[in-house]
Amino acid sequence: MSEKNREGKRAARERLAAERQKQKSAEKRRRTLIVGATVVCVLGLAAVIGVVAANSGDDSSGSDAAAGPVVAPKGADGKDDLAIPVGKASAKSTLEIWEDFRCPACKTFEDTYRSTIHDLADAGELRVQYHLVTLIDANMQGSGSLRAANAAACSQTAGKFRDYHDVLYENQPEETDDAFANNDKLIELAGKVGGLDTGTFKSCVNKGTHDSWVNKSYKAFQDAKYSGTPTVRLNGKDILSDQSLTPAKFKKMVEEANK
């Protein structure tokens, strides 16, 4: 391996680590703000709770109903059907990826490992389970994570998930630019995937068919107490904690696990 290649891989690992640390810090700040705001809200709530109770009727809809039914994309699997699978079910190893389409660290991971993951999946050696979350929406505000994740779920129903997934990362805007909040932009990008830009796909994107499913996936991410994206686990083991990880090393890990 040339010195240039080694430096490139080292730089990619450093960018990935830096972005994940940035996410953790942002999440910590957000939680601190939420706790502080909650205290204020509770104090205010005590003064008006009697009035609210007196004027409240029976609201049978509830917040879950208001958010719409949880509609999993076609072929979703895993616990509660919250994962989008890529690769053969017979593969001996499973790679779980918890990701956010607005997340710069996720793009760094994709750019570095995409071809290796595709090769292993195509060879029947690896099954990938993609879990879509909305961490950046929560940290930076906006709705691009949710809108992009819903569109990706729509592409799964159309049988085009992997290609569209890659297109989203290849065209990822800056983290502070909530461009993916625009459904028209997501539909425009679908034109880069043969056979995806259909009336059915457009309707799915515009209706937010899988919004509640994406929100449920993010809730599962929070319940698991994962602290950042991407969270990547090979056969249940976190692999990004290994600062020396490279595509070649990852491939070897899979091959060893499959023996």
Image (cartoon, rainbow, N blue to C red):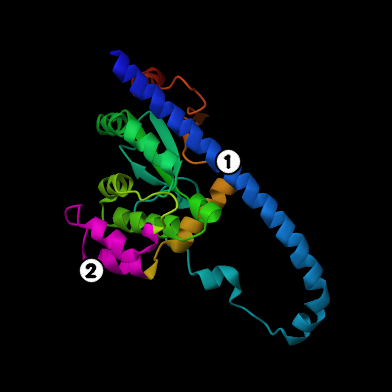
Residue 161 in magenta? no
Q: Position of residue 253 (x, y in %)?
A: 40, 20
- For discs 2 and 1, the disc positioned in front in the rendered view: 1
Mark 1 lies on a secondary structure that is helix
Task: Give how far across and how far down residue 87 sits, in percent.
Answer: 31, 38
Numbered label attached to residue 199: 2
From where the camera sits, is residue 257 visible?
yes
Residue bearing the label numbered 1: 24
Specify whether residue 201 is painted magenta.
yes
* Placement of the N terminus among the 4 image quadrants: top left
Residue at x 34%, y 65% (from the top left corner): 183
Lower position in the chain sequence, tag 2 or tag 1: 1
Residue 140: x and y in percent read 52, 54
* Position of residue 237 in the picture relative to residue 8 (left or right): right
* Boundaries of the magenta span: 179-206
Tell me how far mark 2 sits from mark 1, CA to CA: 39 Å
Type of amino acid under label 1: Lys
Residue 48, how many percent across, how many down? 79, 78
Residue lying at 66% horizontally and 51% vertically, measured from the top left: 31
Say what amino acid the circle numbered 2 marks: Gly
* Crowd band around label 2 with a 10 angstrom C-alpha radius: few (<14), some (14–19), many (20+): few
